[in-house]
Amino acid sequence: MIIYRDIVSGDEVGSDSFKLELVDDVVFKALSTMAIDEDDPDAGPKINIVKIHDLTEVQYDKKSYGMQVKGYMGKVVAHLTAKNPGRVEPFKKGAQNFVMNTVMPNIADFQFWTGKDMNPEGMVLLSRYEEGNTAPTFYFWRDGVDAEKV
């Protein structure tokens, strides 16, 4: 199994146990499911990605998310410049496209999630309910993670 860890916080943000689809060459898209928490069956169904990776929902409006993602993108660009310079331009182009054309016009449709340590400089995962789905689809930055085989 492969665990994806945020390059800034080190938090788990995803794994290959979920079917991942690459969007705009920069964002992994993962469909979650609702499941009963075996530790607390009376609590009702939980989102499996949230439970497995210990994510916490955080609140952003358009302005605050714009500031957060801009700062995070700078960290990813610095990381790519040092580790994989050929990915800098494709990342910048794809990330800008995804943020400006998918997220910002539909900001009210998204929920925002952070990793276990809730590092404000770390990755903020996005989720939204897509048409016909009973559980949200999650999005996380391909170039913002390190893959760890476990």
Image (tube, rainbow, N blue to C red):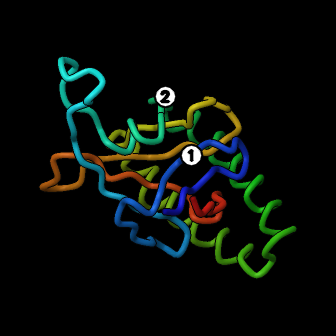
Q: Which image quarter holds the C terminus?
A: bottom right
**Position of residue 82 in the picture relative to residue 105 (left or right):** right
Q: Residues within 10 Å of mark 2 (few under 14, many from 20)?
A: few
Q: Which residue is mark 1?
A: 12
| Mark earlier in primary sequence (2, 1) | 1
At 67% from the left and 68% from the top, the residue drawn is: 92
**Position of residue 95 in the picture relative to residue 135 (left or right):** right
- Residue 141, x across and y down, in percent: 56, 59
- Residue 78, x across and y down, in percent: 83, 60
Disc 1 on helix, strand or loop?
strand
Q: Amino acid at mark 2?
A: Val
Q: Amino acid at mark 1?
A: Glu
Q: Up-down: is 45 above or below 79? A: above
Q: Which of label 2 and label 1 is nearer to you?
A: 1
Disc 2 on helix, strand or loop?
strand
Q: Residue furthest bottom?
A: 86
At 62% from the left and 47% from the top, the residue drawn is: 69
- Residue 15, x across and y down, in percent: 47, 57
Q: Residue furthest right?
A: 82
The Cα atoms of the two marked residues, 2 and 1, are separated by: 16 Å
Residue 68 or 137: which is nearer the viewer?
Answer: 137
**Position of residue 63 in the picture relative to residue 111 (left or right):** right
Q: Up-down: is 95 above or below 70? A: below
Q: Residue furthest top?
A: 42
Q: Which residue is mark 2?
A: 58
Q: Residue furthest front?
A: 150
Q: Residues within 10 Å of mark 1 (few under 14, many from 20)?
A: many
Mark number for residue 74?
Answer: none
At 40% from the left and 43% from the top, the residue drawn is: 107
- Residue 16, x across and y down, in percent: 44, 63
Q: Up-down: is 20 above or below 126? A: below
